[in-house]
Image (cartoon, rainbow, N blue to C red):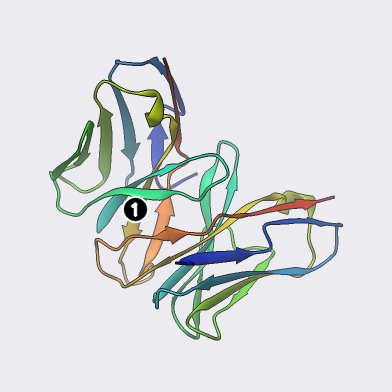
Amino acid sequence: NAGVTQTPKFRVLKTGQSMTLLCAQDMNHEYMYWYRQDPGMGLRLIHYSVGEGTTAKGEVPDGYNVSRLKKQNFLLGLESAAPSQTSVYFCASSYSPGLATEAFFGQGTRLTVV
Amino acid sequence: TQLLEQSPQFLSIQEGENLTVYCNSSSVFSSLQWYRQEPGEGPVLLVTVVTGGEVKKLKRLTFQFGDARKDSSLHITAAQPGDTGLYLCAGLLMTTDSWGKLQFGAGTQVVVTP
């Protein structure tokens, strides 16, 4: 009963370092999303994917890249981390483009950039 | 500026009182969802509304979708401490340039004290 799994759960980076956040879902979902959550800002969409091999930009894509090489995985990369990228990152997935589709979330990755 | 504006940002009430949370936008959404998030967890879906004017009830929670599909409200009757959490509305865009884009409001933090 894994659902959506994010790794790692916590990470501290130095400014300028790079890292990749991994999101894996075992529900055969088509759609996957990466959000960041900051106090008072709610969930802001970084990038999303409507199927394997496709990605699209969300509201706040700058400084991030993504890849969806396999249907079950959605990777979020930070090439050169900045303190402004300190946040909690959530991955989500949903089954289909149907209107009543539910998004399932991982437990989040808390990233601190010093 | 967020596509979905939620109000109020924070709500503190006594057990047994009623409350209403609002979610407004200038955009038309194919569907609108409400999620609740507990500390340290990802959001969990409460309800999806699809049709303009639709009203859905979930025990003491009543959800309404505006006729023009631009706004929604969540009403809780006789709130209980277990209703404490961050309530988030999310709208699904299915336009040509935003297919499958699920965007969230900033959230309303609800605290219900015994």
Is there any visible trace of residue B106 in the rendered image? Answer: yes
Q: Is residue B75 above or below residue A64?
A: above
Q: Position of residue A96 (x, y in %)?
A: 31, 73
Q: Residue at x 47, y 84 (%)?
A: A52
Horizontal placement of A90 versus A111: left or right? left
Viewer-side residue, A109 vs A37: A109
Q: Amino acid at mark 1?
A: Gly
Q: Residues within 10 Å of mark 1 (few under 14, many from 20)?
A: many
Residue identifier under label 1: B91
Chain letter belonging to callout 1? B
Quarter assignment of residue B18: top left
Horizontal placement of A24 versus A9: left or right? left
Q: Quadrant of the N terminus of chain A?
A: bottom left
Q: Residue at x 54, y 77 (%)?
A: A73
Viewer-side residue, B79 vs A12: B79
Quarter assignment of residue A18: bottom right
Q: Residue furthest front?
A: A1
Q: Is residue A101 above or below residue B65?
A: below
Viewer-side residue, B65 vs B110: B110
Q: Position of residue B48 (x, y in %)?
A: 25, 52
Q: Residue at x 22, y 31 (%)?
A: B60
Q: Is residue B46 above or below residue B14?
A: below
The image shows a total of numbered marks equal to: 1
Callout 1: helix, strand or loop?
Answer: strand
Q: Position of residue A8 (x, y in %)?
A: 69, 63
Q: Position of residue A35 (x, y in %)?
A: 54, 57
Viewer-side residue, A59 vs A86: A86
